[in-house]
Each structure stands twice: as structure tokens, then as C-alpha cells.
Image (spheres, rainbow, N blue to C red):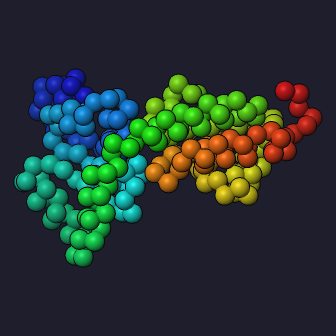
Amino acid sequence: MRELVKCAREYDLKIHVDGARIFNAAVACKVDVKELVQGVDSVQFCLTKGLGAPMGSLLVGSQEFISRAGKWRKMLGGGFRQIGIMTAAGIVALETMIDRLEEDHMRAKKLALGLNELPYLSVCVDEVETNIVIVEIIPELITMKEFLAKLAENGIKAKDIGPTKVRFVTHKEINEDDINFVIERLSPKNTALNSSYEI
Ligand SMILES: *Cc1c(COP(=O)(O)O)cnc(C)c1O
């Protein structure tokens, strides 16, 4: 970030940070979020996602910038007059959700390690730094359709993000037992695999 800021300044450019998950990034990097956005002009971040509020994103910047952004929001129909009830949830998110993100990261790591042990799945465990776990199925052993059906039948919500990839995300509502449940339910003793393929 320091290099980017320096480079942008040299060319007289502004920097906007698309920081939807910046608090997860800050916690994973063990730095204050202020340090991650030092010297930038504007930042967007989500109160939803890791911070768990029911809705809302914030745009942060200079007063002049925010006042212009407000006009654009109005032109695009994004105004919301009765937003107080949601900003209350946003304050709870900012005050109580940031320090616990580390838990989500630890659970994601545990999930990654557990799923990587299963013969029909593969996970780059080292790449799991925050609350997102990308799991690759081994299509010779299980098809995507079968895997997604297996997840659905156990009430496990995860999203296919490619022909062989499924994304799992941990958050405040996912506890230690849930992680154990997922690993247990997906173990080969509970999952029919293509038996014609030798492991
Ligand atoms: C989710 C996301 C957004 C959009 O955030 P909203 O809260 O839907 O406005 C933008 N950028 C990135 C990288 C995101 O993950």
C-alpha cells in the first residue's frame, strides 16, 4: 500500500480502496486498519460480510468527496431516509465484530485442514488467511452435482465458484461444533464416492 500511495502521488493520481473485507485483511495482517489505508483518498468497506451487519457499506473520504458522493447517490436513487435503524446495527458491527474476526480465521483454517484430509477434496491450506476457504473437488471421485447435493442435504451452505471449486466462509454464526459437523458429514464414511476409481 505504501508503494502504491507513493507511486500514485508521483503521477498526481487519487487512490480509492475497494476494501469490502478490509477488517479481515487488517486482522490477518495483524496491522491496524488505519495503517492499511494510510495516505489514500477514499475507502469503501462492507458492514455486512465479516462484520455481520444485516446491510450496509460505508464510503469514507474527505468532506468534499463525501458531499459529492452523496449527490451521486441521490441521482442514482440510492438514498435511504429511514436508515437510522440500520446504522445502529452498523455501530454494533464496528464496536463488537472486529476483534472477534480472528476466531473466524482460526475456524476457517481448521475447516481447511479438515477438508484437505478428505480423499476427494483438496485445499491450499496455506492460502487460507482470512475467513474464506476455497475447496477443490477431485472430479474422478465426486461430481460437482453430487458434492453440492451432499452439502445441501446436510444444510451446509457453500457456493460453487467454478467447475471444480466451492467456497466456504466462516462468520459469527459458525462455531467450533459447526466446523466439526461439516468435516464429519463430508467424511468418506458418510459420502458415496465413485468406487471404480482407486484412491
Ligand atoms: C462485496 C463487495 C463489494 C460490494 O459491497 P456492497 O456492500 O454490496 O456495496 C465491493 N467490492 C468487493 C471487493 C466486495 O467483496
Q: Residue furthest bottom?
A: 82
Position in image of residue 73 (x %, y %): 22, 65
Q: Which residue: 30% across, 67% down?
A: 86
Q: Farthest residue to the right: give it.
A: 196
Residue 1 position in % (x across, y down): 25, 28
Measuring 24% from the left and 34% from the top, which residue is drawn there?
A: 32
Query: Which is more toward the observer, 161 or 120?
Result: 120
| In the rendered image, the vertical position of residue 123 relative to residue 89, given as above or below | above
Q: As drawn, is 43 to the left or to the right of 172?
A: left
> Is residue 59 among what the camera can see?
yes
Say which residue appears at 76% left-offset and 40% top-offset.
Answer: 187
Of residues 72 and 164, the one nearer the viewer is 164
Question: In which quadrant of the rendered image does the C terminus lie?
Answer: top right
* Left or right: 89 in relation to 162: left
> What is the x, y in percent for residue 139?
76, 37
- Residue drawn at (22%, 75%), measured in percent from left and top? 81
| Lateral position of residue 52 relative to residue 81, left or right | right
